[in-house]
Amino acid sequence: MRKYLLLTIAFFFSICASQSFAQAKRAGENRYPFISFYWFSEKPTIELSYGISEINLGGINTDFKKPGMIELHLGYSNEFTSKYSKNVIRYDNDYLFLSNATTDVSSQKNSAGINSSLWRFGFGNKDGTGLKFGSFTVMPYNANSFTWSRFSFDKSAALNPADYDKFDNFNEAFRFGTSAEAGINLQITKGFSLQPKYEVSDIFPRHLFGQQMVSSLIELCGAEVLDEFTGRIMKNTPVAGTVVNFVLKSAYEFGIYQLRKEHMNWPFTNEAPLRYSTFKMGMTFTF
């Protein structure tokens, strides 16, 4: 089964070089972003988020103001009882999103530093396994998305020439990238939930299709192995497995993005991505 999934992903990469996306769906769960053909049988969701971002580029200590990020998700979600326990709930959400990160809406807009603005859009998937307590559900989740971003900054700011050239490479141009997010979906009541979450989003200075395909396939293979491991834990101890599943998957994605911090298509040696690290608080309405 896993071999055919990898071949399918390689096929999609080969026909979608400018938009390359990966699909991994098995046993009723998705890990990588894709547009679901079953959206219209699922429940529509609207998610609004606000957060504060930190901007980094390959370890350059440039003093950017921390922008505020406003984000809108539109998608479809599905929630169902796990086969392991009636108190364990599976959650899946496919979505399109649009966000703006700018110092104009930041709580630190009057602080010292360089002003910047980021518009981005894309599509993604989040899934998780949580615990149900009556009408209240605690649902840790992980999400991955593909993004297209337009970054700009105050070009009159004092930057040394080397740093200026690196940031100017991203300035006022649409760039492809990826993001990973970990959070906890707290369903307060049916149809409404809150989510504290943390996202790491990389913007590539250029899209090297072949290298990105290999890097993504390596990530997927590791995630498949991890998924098999956490699936066995869920089978034996479903309640504890929900926590272990979230912690291990979050640690894995964090490790992958740490490897890509200096080289955007690790394990290949190339340029560093422009990275937005964002703590966010969201609220979701499910209809």
Image (spheres, rainbow, N blue to C red):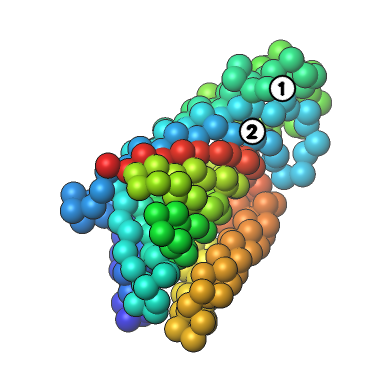
* Residue positioned most to the left: 41
Write down the residue under mark 2.
52
Quarter of the image where the C terminus is located:
top left
Spot occupied by residue 165 in the image (x, y as percentages of width and height): 69, 29
Direction from residue 50 to residue 11 in the image, left or right? left
Q: Nearer the viewer, residue 37 or 44?
A: 44
**Where does the image place residue 128, in percent across and percent down from the top left?**
45, 61
Task: Assign the N terminus to one quadrant of the image.
Answer: bottom left
Secondary structure state at the residue bearing disc 2: strand
Rendering coords of residue 161 (x, y %): 78, 26
Mark 1–mark 2 Cα distance, whole angstroms, equals 9 Å
Vertical placement of 33 versus 154: above or below? below
280 sits to left or right of 159:
left
Please give the name of the residue rendered at 37% of the width and 73% of the height, measured from the top-left corner.
86
Q: Which one is in front, 150 or 210? A: 150
Residue positioned 64% across, 23% down in the render: 106
Residue 108 disc label: 1
Q: Nearer the viewer, residue 128 or 25?
A: 128
